[in-house]
């Protein structure tokens, strides 16, 4: 009974899904969210973000972020995106993207991204997430994971109700460490690769990407969490992968 329930739930989800390909890497994706839903979510989230965070009043750095962002977006081949780039006051060395081409950069990134090439590394990485629809893909993975867990709970509630709590704990850990975190790390590698491609097409020095991530490694001083328990790959793994990607462009 349990197997049939799981199968029915998965087939139901797959019936309304879209199979697509990521840019540059050409990886097959399963996405259960429409582009229209994704773009609307991005618009709403971006407005809320700008209301909750302090916009930087540094006009020079803001223009720098916008100019580099627009230069990279011009080669991203997503005319349906309404690209916007915001610089917000926050000491964290960070940036993030929202669906539909909304990129938010923290002022703390300038501790490491001192050159235009370094800043392009950060922004191109976030653009890579956006055009690869990584957010929608993660949401879809969460929907599938939740549906399978619900179906299994229905089956266990009938046959082995005493095992429900144990199953949910085990399933939660297994899904997180065995599927969700590795999947997220894969997306990080992919965003790096797409980012290098965008930098190359936009005329930036792609070697700057390696310099930036080596500087990030120095800043972290080995304080990053173990790769298996993180949404992001280790500094060493990221730098090694980037080196191979960059060498590939140089050998063309």
Image (cartoon, rainbow, N blue to C red):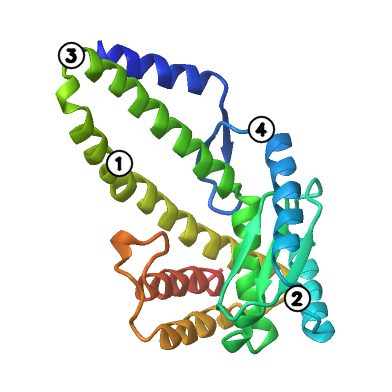
Q: Nearer the viewer, mark 2 or mark 1?
A: 1
Q: Residue at x 53, y 52 (%)?
A: 25
Of callouts 4 and 1, the N-terminal one: 4
Mark 4–mark 1 distance (CA, rounded to whole Å): 27 Å
**Does residue 176 appear anywhere in the picture?**
yes
Residue at the spot of label 1? 172
Of callouts 2 and 4, the N-terminal one: 4
Instruction: Say what secondary structure mark 1 lies in.
Output: helix
Residue at the spot of label 4? 34
Picture quadrant where residue 175 is located: top left
Mark 2–mark 1 distance (CA, rounded to whole Å): 39 Å
The x and y percentages for residue 14 are 49, 23
Mark 2–mark 3 distance (CA, rounded to whole Å): 58 Å
Query: Which label was assigned to residue 65?
Result: 2
Q: Are marks 2 and 3 in contact (CB under 8 Å)?
A: no
Query: Which label was assigned to residue 159?
Result: 3
The x and y percentages for residue 194 are 58, 60
Query: Which label was assigned to residue 162?
Result: none
């Amino acid at each position: 009974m349990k197997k049939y329930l799981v199968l029915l739930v998965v087939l139901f989800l797959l019936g309304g899904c879209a199979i697509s390909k990521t840019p540059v890497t050409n990886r097959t994706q399963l996405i259960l969210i429409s582009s229209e839903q994704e773009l609307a979510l991005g618009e709403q989230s971006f407005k809320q973000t700008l209301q909750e965070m302090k916009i930087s009043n540094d006009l020079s750095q803001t223009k720098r972020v916008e100019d580099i962002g627009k230069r990279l977006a011009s080669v991203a081949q997503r005319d349906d995106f309404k690209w916007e780039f915001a610089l917000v006051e926050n000491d964290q060395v960070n940036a993030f993207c929202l669906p539909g081409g909304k990129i938010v950069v923290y002022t703390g990134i300038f501790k490491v991204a001192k050159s235009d090439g370094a800043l392009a590394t950060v922004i191109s990485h976030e653009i890579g997430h956006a055009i690869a629809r990584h957010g929608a893909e993660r949401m879809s993975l969460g929907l599938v994971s939740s549906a399978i867990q619900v179906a299994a709970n229905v089956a266990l509630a009938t046959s082995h109700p005493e095992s429900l709590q144990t199953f949910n704990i085990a399933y939660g850990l297994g899904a997180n460490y065995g599927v969700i975190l590795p999947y997220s790390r894969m997306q990080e590698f992919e965003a790096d690769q797409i980012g290098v491609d965008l930098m190359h097409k936009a005329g930036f020095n792609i070697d700057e990407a390696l310099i930036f991530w080596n500087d990030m490694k120095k800043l972290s001083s080995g304080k990053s969490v173990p790769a298996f328990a993180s949404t992001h790959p280790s500094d060493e793994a990221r730098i090694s992968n980037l080196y191979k990607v960059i060498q590939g462009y140089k050998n063309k």
